[in-house]
Image (cartoon, grey):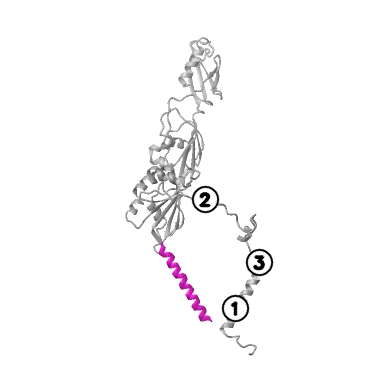
Amino acid sequence: MSKNEGIGTPGARVARSFTRLLAGAALVTLSGCIVPSDGPLTREVIESGAAGGSSYKIPQTKMVFDVVEIDQRVANSVTTLGTPSLARTFGFGGAGGTPVIGVGDKLDVTIFEAGPDGLFSTTERKSTTIPVVVQPDGRGQIPYVGSVRFAGMTIDTARSTIVDALKAKAVEPDVLVSIAGNESRAVSVQGDVNDAAMIPLGLNAEHLSEVLARAGGATKAPYDTYVTLKRGGRSGTVLLQTIVDNPKEDIIVRPEDRIYVTYDPQTFSALGQTSKSGKVRFDASSLSLIEAAALAGGGNMTTADPKGYFIFRYENESVYRNVVGDDRFRDLLAKGMTSDGQGRYPIIYRLDLGRPQSYIVAQSFPVRNRDVIYLSRHPATDFGRFVQMITGTVSAVNTTNRTF
């Protein structure tokens, strides 16, 4: 056979191409130090750990939750009990009784005398005004009276106490007590308001919306703004829009309440076979499931399973118990269901869009902030992909046979 024999055959050409490919791969491997890199490889990170060649596997605990079919009863329960309410947490409140003097209050005590040369009067002036600041021990000093415990007194009680103490010392004394600074009856308003401050309360009962207005109002739209009220050991959070729309949620505030206003746009995440995937904003105070589906662009007609529309969320215990029943809820707890940091439990709601009534139910089922909406793929989709894979493999084999 001559030296050049067989060089031009198809088999020889393929062999030469394969040899060049291997040589190129070896060259790249040997010159790895000059290949640009933005960090270590996965293998390098794992090998750097204490285990040496494998990542440490923490024992996994199974997450326990229920998958609940959405019907009208479930939709009504989630709507009624799942909506946060300040009125349910604190009660609407009332006038709170007669205001009393407290520590830190600033008082103006004006003492009148009938005689021209009394303890608090002169020929030119029949009265003297004494400024008093109620000290941490609840007391304040009045000349010729001494230490008076003002904390806990009403204005009328304080006046009577001073008058009685001066009757034997002043000439027909009379007293007027007024509050110059109501420091003990104040609430704190912080966060996304135009003028965060300590807001002193008046003598009349004041609603939450009135206190927010005195703090300059919220800086953002009410449907994207949350109001959290903390009182003692309790806390409640609602949308500002809820307070605007529902007068029952515009509760009476009390001294020492703490109010936090937070801008946090409501969103849900659309995943799976929806036309639009990712985070989607409400841009409204409330959103129904059918509206959320529309915002996500509906489902992919060729791959989506209309029977597999799921809503993943953590639900309040009262809602969970009402939806599945007390016995089932206790059973889930016994199986290991645990709550998140806010006392809510994992649940998945399922909607079957293959049934006509589901489109009516979905109009009254509320989507919550941070919900995950997932539209599963149709089982036939996997078979179609398998057929495409087989078809592609056969096509590649035929191409190779023609090459050789």
Quarter of the image where one finds residue 329: top left
Numbered disc 2: secondary structure: loop
- Disc 2 packing (10 Å; few <14; some 14–19; many ≥20): few
Residue 33 in percent (x, y) is at 67, 65
65 versus 205 height, above or below: below
Q: Nearer the viewer, residue 230 or 346?
A: 346
Dot 3 corresponds to which residue?
32
Q: Is residue 385 visible?
A: yes
Q: For the residues marked 2 and 1, what is the alpha-carbon distance in whole angstroms?
A: 52 Å
Span shown in magenta: 378-404
Of the numbered discs 1 and 3, the one sitting upstream in the chain is 1
Check if residue 389 falls in the magenta segment. Answer: yes
Disc 1 + disc 3, Cβ < 8 Å: no
Residue extending farthest bottom: 1
Nearer to us: label 2 or label 3:
2
Nearer to us: label 2 or label 1:
2
Dot 1 corresponds to which residue?
17
Residue 353 in percent (x, y) is at 36, 56
